[in-house]
Each structure stands twice: as C-alpha cells, then as structure tokens.
Amino acid sequence: MGGSLPLTQSPTPTFMRSATLNFINELRTAGLRIALSESLDAVQAVAAAGVEREVLREALAACMVKDEEDRYTFDTVFNRFFTGSHPRARKKPLPHSGQGVGPRTTQTAHSERTRPQPRQSEKRPLSRPSVQPQAAETKEKKESPTALLQSAGDASQNPTEDETSQQDKARLASRKALLHKSLSLFDSRDVEDAKDLVDELAHRFRGHLSRRYQRTKHGRLDFRRTIRASISHGGAPVNLFMKGRRPGRPDLLAWCDLSGSVSTVSDFLLALLAPAGKYFRQVHTFAYVDRLCEVSFEQGYVVPHGELDLYARSDFGRVLQHFWQAEGERLLTRNTIVLILGDARNNRRPPRPDLLARIRDRTKKLIWLNPEPEERWDTGDSVMGRYTPMCDAVLGCGNLKELLGTLKRVF
C-alpha cells in the first residue's frame, strides 16, 4: 500500500472501526472462530497501527490468527476484502558488515548461471511500458490506503440488488416460519429471533385497538364540536363532526401460566399486551403456577412483584381459590374482561370450576386461551372440559399467528 498517508488522506476513526468489523465478519464467514475480546483487540490494533498495508495485515493477524493453519485463509480474505495492489516485495537484506556492494564474486556468478531457468510460460517481461504521469497518479490514488478501505467499506455496506433481494427473501422466509411454527417447539434461539417479530405483532395489535376509538365519519351531527370548530372560519361550518358509537374502554385482567409447558406462550402474550395498555381503563396482569402473583412486562422480561415458584406443580384450583379470597372483590367488575392463558393441566388436583363460574358471573367476558392442540384437551391430567362451560369462549393459540388472531377476535 505504499508509505504513510498525509493527514488529509487518513480515514476517520469511525470508518476504520466499521471497516474492521466488516472484515471480521468476512473472516467468520470463511470459517475462522473469532471471539468478542479478539474483535475488540483488533479494533484497538488498527487504531494503533494505522493503514500501512503490511503493518495493518500483521496487526490484524496477531489479534485473530490463533493457529498457523488459519493464516492462509486470513491472507486470502485480507487480499480480497482490502482490494488493491498486492503487497510490495520485501527488500533484499543488507549485506553483512565487511562485505562490499560492488560486483559479485565469481562463485556467486557461477551459482547464478547454474540455477535452472524458468520455462517460457513462466517468464515475465523484463521491462514494462512507460506510464504517463496522469495515469500513474490515478493508479497511485486508487491504490492508496483510503481508497482501499473505502472500496472495502462500500462493498460490505452497499450490497448489490441481487444480494439485497436474496437477503430480504431469506428474512421473510425466516419470519414466516417463526410465525407458523408451533410455540411448543420453540427453543432459546427461536425465542431470541422472534423478539423483533413480536414487536411488529404488538404494533399491529395496537393499530387494531386504535381503530376502535377513531372518530367516525358517519352518524348523527355533533353540533357542539361543529360550532366550536366553525369559530376559526368566521362561523361557517366548514368541518362537520359526527357522533359515532365509540366503545368504552374495558378493564383487562390477564392470567398467564408460567409453568414449563406454556411459559414461552405467556411471555409472548404479555409482550403483545404491554404496549396496548392505554386502550384499557385498567390493566392487571398475573402469573401463576400453583399460586397467583402479580407481574409486569418491562424491557422484554416478566418481572414478578411477589413470590413465584416456577418449579412447583401446577394447581389452577388453588389459584382460583387464592384469587377469589384475596382479589375478587377489588378487581372484578361488570366492565372487566378476564383473559386466561394455560393448558388446564392440574396434576389431578381439585379443579374448582365453581370458582371460575363465580368469576364469570361478575365480569363482562371470560376468555380462555389454550396453546395445546385441541386433540390433546382432556387427555392425561387436562381438565379443559371442566372449565369450558364456564367460559364465554375457549380459543387455541398454538403459534404466533393464531395468538395475534385470537387477541383481535377477543378485543
């Protein structure tokens, strides 16, 4: 890459850091295992070494090449990523002290003559055609460190249309697969990948609720609002406002089962409900395993406000009894919608459907969401059939698409 650059041609620290991180991603794609600490060391090494090609390559190699077998891969990616002229040939070593720099000795000349000559196809031209000063200046500009880093950054940050199209298709296919994948089959990686998708679904759910409270363009004339708006137009009723039938905001009471079988679904349900709180008059969210505990959803995590044993055995009958005695009088009104998420597996303990019936009689609506397939209801220790007559509706929510569709049907 030539010698040091003048200060005016030196890349900015932000650009150097971006180019280094993109280069590290290329190395990982090529198969090199690079830890986060090694990436940080590489960024600091580039800041200290500068953009001299040889120095830059050796500094990066010292930070990220842990095995000599990986050096070939590193050099190949380096030459491809930082496109431009190849490294200059190393200078010949200086003669030892006491040796002259004049004509070669007879022995040296003899060894030169007896060295096997390359084949005709391997011979290189001894001289190159002269280059015009302007062309040489253009070539030197293209091969400067700034130009090399700029081309590397542009290649990584500005992919072609085909690459962008392929990336978009792959991303859409991945999101569609997560949307339809059974929540019971989600692993930790799927949960992490679905966070952005759940945020988008929460935005859709908020939009669904907001449309219920928009002012209608049809109906009876609202004289008060129309006359108030006409004052700014000299008394002329330019804008007509109508009286629409707007639903009142209900109270929401949500119970989520956090036992191991349905905990992932409960997390997603709370993530969908949390941003939509302003469309309800009051929102109370509870989690349960064998007892009820009030929780909130903060920064992507469920935060309990009391004791909650996630390793206890499920006992929904005890949960109903605890709620009826502690919170029933305070939270249950004719404007309350009760939303229960669970698989109704009670470990063969008393289910207490009579308490669920009392809760239903004192509320506006009671909806049960069950993430298990319907063919598994009432099998084993499931008592879904005992609770179904006490509910206004029992709906399935086996994947994210069904969960969002169920919430839109309920509200």
Image: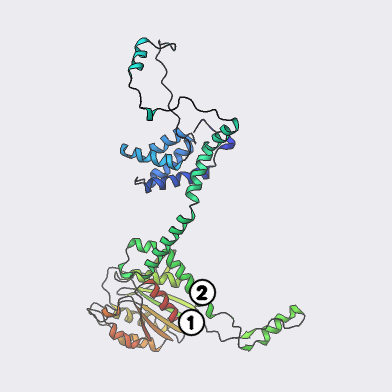
Q: Position of residue 296 (x, y in %)?
A: 42, 69
Q: Amino acid at mark 2?
A: Gly
Dot 2 lies on which element? helix
Q: Earlier in the sequence, mark 2 or mark 1?
A: 2
Dot 1 lies on which element? loop
* Residue 40, above or below 354: above
Q: Position of residue 409 (x, y in %)?
A: 43, 81
Mark sitting on residue 250: 1
Residue plotted at (61% across, 88% down): 219
Disc 2 designates what residue?
A: 207
Q: Please name whichever residue, 214 or 256, is drawn nearer the observer in this view of the structure.
A: 214
Spatial distance from mark 2 to mark 1, Cα to Cα? 17 Å
Residue plotted at (40% across, 27% down): 123
In this picture, residue 364 sits left or right of residue 69: right
Place residue 397 in its image quadrant. bottom left
Q: Position of residue 176 (x, y in %)?
A: 40, 67
Residue 128 in sight from this viewpoint: yes
Residue plotted at (43% across, 76% down): 284
